[in-house]
Every structure is written in C-alpha cells, then in structure tokens.
Image (cartoon, grey):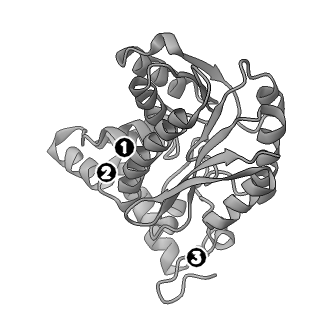
Amino acid sequence: MTAVDGAAPGFAELRRDLPRRSPRAWRFGALALGSRAGALVSDGLRIGHAHGFDSGPFMAHVYANRPAGRTSFGRRLDARLLARGTCRAFREVRRLAQQAVVDAIDAHTGEAPMIADLAAGPAPYLLEAIARRPGARALVCDVDPTALAQAAAAAERLGVGDRVRTLRADAFDRTALRSLDPRPDVVIELGLYGIYPDDELIERHFHDLAELVAPRQVVLNVQTQNPEIEYIARVWRDHRGERCVWRLRPADRLLGWAAAAGYVPGSVTADSQGIYRVARLERRDP
C-alpha cells in the first residue's frame, strides 16, 4: 500500500527512506528537526529521544499525563505530545490491560497466581492489578534496566514490593523462557508485537510460550491501525536509536497464531479510536 489519497503507507514503504528530493522527505525532515529541538524544553520529547519512544521511561511519562518541561512553552509542547491520538490510545490500553490482568487473576483456579510480564517496561498495569489482588505475585521482565528500576520503585510505592520480582531478560530468549521459576500462571505481553516486524518470530513465540512456559492464560495487545503511523516512523526513534517503524497487524492474525499454539480468546476489547485490541487468552484443554 502506498500513501495515496490519504491512505496510510504499508510497513514495507515505511521501512524505506524517502527520496531526498521528495517534498514528503522535506516535510518529515523538518518535523524531525522540530521534535529534536523541542526535546530541549519538553520533558516528553527529551525522554523519547533519549530512551526511545517505545521505551519504558517514555511510556511512564505518557501514563502520568502531566505536561512538564522548561518554560511555559516547553510545557505546552509537552501537552501537545501527550494529547496525540497515539498517546491517548496508550493510556486507554493501559486501563484495558489492567482490567484484563485483573480478570486473568480472578479466572485463576488455584491460589497465589504468578503473573509474569515478559516485556514489562515500568509495568504500571501489572503493579496496579497486583495491588488490587493481594493474593497475586508478579515477575517483571525487561531488557531495559531503567524500566526495571522504575517498576521496582513503583512496586515499593504501591506496597507490593514483597510480591514483585524483577528480571532482566529478553521475551524471545528461549533459554530465559525455559528457566522461569516458578512457572507463571499468566503471561503478559503488551506493546511487544508492534516493535518486532518479523511475523515468523511472533508466530514461533506463541509456540515457545506454550511449550516452554505453558501459562494457563496470556494477556496481549496488538496495534491494528494508526493514522499517525507514518509520523511515528519518520519522526520518532526507538530504544535502539533507529526509526520507530511499528508493524500493524490484524487482530485475527494474532489470534490465529495463538489458536495454533493452543490458546483461545477469553475476551477481546478495543480503545475508543480502534488503534489497539487487548485480548485475554485461555489455554485450550487437550
């Protein structure tokens, strides 16, 4: 798909750099320069450009939804960032995800369920759900030590530090998955699939979860459409310092991969803009 008549460009097009003499290249180049200049005064832009707009620290700023920066102009600029449709969807998905985690805890038939978030960032939805359900425990995993430190500090503030453990690990590392101890009853993967474009990687990951971890439930989300997807790809940078090209996927595709691995939907919800779907999956009995 190409960006014609207002249609969003497809993933392959977003991955390609625009021709240097293209008016679109000039426009997005100017927007990128403006974003970097804004980072001098806007806290959100500063965090995004320093850590990545897909990072735990940036998501924590979006969730807090408190414009901050140097001078009144910086705070106004930060307020515009936080009011973007994508950032509003992030906050809505947080609430939907938190409820899905609470529902997963309530659906657990045993005692003291272990909930593992394999790419947690600061994990606010998980920690708040744990605070609401005193019998649950949590394992917070991420590759970003800053995000893990934020999660640990938040757990202490919420009074759940004794029920939360952090672990630096990659969600796609089969060795890390195999060594999880105790095995989680519920696995959470939110915001993960849009960062990784490889369909085969995600499809195989569902089978790895089923084989190596075997949780009874999985809570996930998928970004199905986003009118800001080209702006994000050409202006924002990810945690690796590369262009923030996110992969949009139909919800049915994710659910099909999950079904092949033995998981069926318990519930599926969407934010008000229809950007995300949040699903709670249940392991299908043989």
The answer to which quarter of the image holds residue 144 is top right
Q: Position of residue 216 (x, y in %)?
A: 69, 37
Q: Residue at 77% across / 45% down in the picture?
A: 285
Nearer to the camera, 111 or 278:
111
**For the residue carrying disc 3, how many other residues have a C-alpha within 10 Å: few (<14), some (14-19), or many (20+)?**
some
Identify the amino acid type marked 3: Pro
Q: Residue at 40% across / 56% down in the picture?
A: 89
Q: Position of residue 44 (x, y in %)?
A: 35, 43
* Lower position in the chain sequence, tag 2 or tag 3: 3
* Lower position in the chain sequence, tag 2 or tag 1: 1
Q: Residue at 44% across / 40% down in the picture?
A: 98
Q: Is residue 20 above or below residue 30?
A: below
Q: CA distance from mark 1 to mark 3?
A: 26 Å
* Lower position in the chain sequence, tag 1 or tag 3: 3
**For the residue carrying disc 2, how many other residues have a C-alpha within 10 Å: few (<14), some (14-19), or many (20+)?**
many
**For the residue carrying disc 1, how many other residues have a C-alpha within 10 Å: few (<14), some (14-19), or many (20+)?**
many
On the rendered structure, is 168 left or right of 237?
right
- Residue denoted by label 2: 82
Q: CA distance from mark 2 to mark 1?
A: 6 Å
The answer to which quarter of the image holds residue 9 is bottom right
- Residue denoted by label 1: 62
Q: Is residue 158 above or below residue 271?
A: above
In the current view of this chain or complex, which residue is farthest to the bottom? Answer: 5
Nearer to the camera, 154 or 178:
178
Any mark on residue 35, and which? none
Q: Position of residue 97 (x, y in %)?
A: 47, 44
Viewer can see residue 45: yes
Identify the amino acid type marked 1: Val
Any mark on residue 9, and which? 3
Q: Position of residue 82 (x, y in %)?
A: 31, 51
Kind of element beneath mark 1: helix
The answer to which quarter of the image holds residue 252 is bottom right
